Image (cartoon, helix red, strand yellow):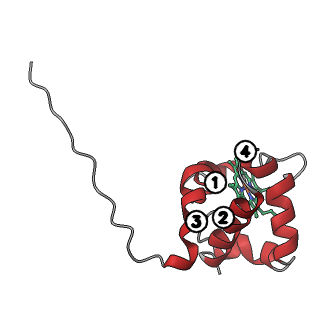
Amino acid sequence: MKKFITGSAVALLLASGAAFADGKAIYDTVCTACHNPAVAPTLKSPGLGDKAAWAPRIAKGMDALYASALNGVPNTAMTAKGGNPSLADADVKAAVDYMVGASK
Ligand code: HEC
């Protein structure tokens, strides 16, 4: 039997900008599970880059969004820190910054 080994594509993440580096890493590790545009509509979450979904949320102000990310949004799939209590507050905020920056 022949074995086909598919080399995983090497992603070149060069263009996104250093300012969002940490937030992007957190997003890619944790938040993408629910905020990936492919799954966001199903989960009723604002997807990365979905300006229409983010606009009314951004209008609440960053402090409100940080609070939602840190504490969760009651009665939704958005739990505190995206379900990862071990994340530092600063990392969660950086992930919010990244998502907001990519969605307006
Ligand atoms: C298990 C799924 C899930 C994960 C993981 C998740 N989210 Fe969410 N998130 C949601 C859903 C669903 C909503 C929409 C909640 C609502 O109805 O306002 C949401 C909403 C938000 C909002 C907007 C809140 C507001 O007040 O409008 C922010 C900010 C946010 N998430 C940040 C994050 C960050 C940062 C992470 C990663 C650390 C993360 N989320 C991980 C499901 C998730």
Circles 3 and 4 in contact, beta carbons < 8 Å: no
Mark linked to residue 86 = 4
Q: What residue appears at the point 68 percent right and 61 percent down from the top-left corner?
A: 91
Q: Mark 4 or 1, which is nearer the eye?
A: 4
Q: What residue appears at the point 29 percent right and 56 percent down from the top-left corner?
A: 10
Query: Which residue position holds label 2?
Result: 95
Label 4, residues with CA under 10 Å away: few <14, some 14-19, many ≥20: few
Q: Position of residue 89 (x, y in %)?
A: 77, 59
Which badge, 4 or 2, comes first in the chain's sequence? 4
Give the residue type that dot 3 points to: Asp
Give the residue type that dot 4 points to: Ser
Q: Secondary structure at mark 1?
A: helix
Which badge, 4 or 1, comes first in the chain's sequence? 1
- Residue 89 against residue 63 in the figure, above or below: above
Query: Which residue position holds label 3?
Result: 22
Circles 2 and 1 in contact, beta carbons < 8 Å: yes
Q: Is residue 92 left or right of residue 33?
A: right
Q: Is residue 35 left or right of residue 74?
A: left
Q: Mark 2 or 3, which is nearer the eye?
A: 3
Q: Is mark 1 within 8 Å of ligand 1?
A: yes
